[in-house]
Amino acid sequence: MARATRFRTEAVTSRIAQPSVSDSLIAALALADHERSTEIYKQTFDVLSIKRFEI
């Protein structure tokens, strides 16, 4: 395997792994306090719905 190909593969693997770790931490926090997480998600949805475009 060429050296450049190996580095590219490692970079892609890193880019996939980092969001997976973040998603796992967010899921763990949401499971720890479900009611609070649900309320925060509702607030986030309400704020973002103001910016949503209708097609």
Image (cartoon, rainbow, N blue to C red):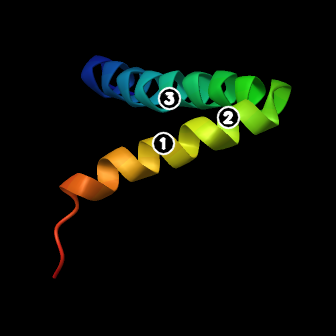
Tag 1 residue: 43
The amino acid beneath tag 2 is Ser
Residue 47: image x %, image y %?
34, 45
The amino acid beneath tag 3 is Pro
Please count the marks in the image: 3
Q: Is residue 43 above or below residue 52?
A: above
Residue 45: image x %, image y %?
44, 51
**Helix, strand or loop at disc 3?**
helix
Is there CB contact under 8 Å for labels 2 and 1? no
In the image: residue 15, left or right of residue 3: right
Point 20% across, 54% down: residue: 51
Point 41% across, 27% down: residue: 15
Q: Nearer the viewer, mark 3 or mark 2?
A: 2
Q: Is residue 29 above or below residue 47?
A: above
Point 40% across, 51% down: residue: 46
Tag 3 residue: 19
Tag 2 residue: 37
Residue 16's tag is none
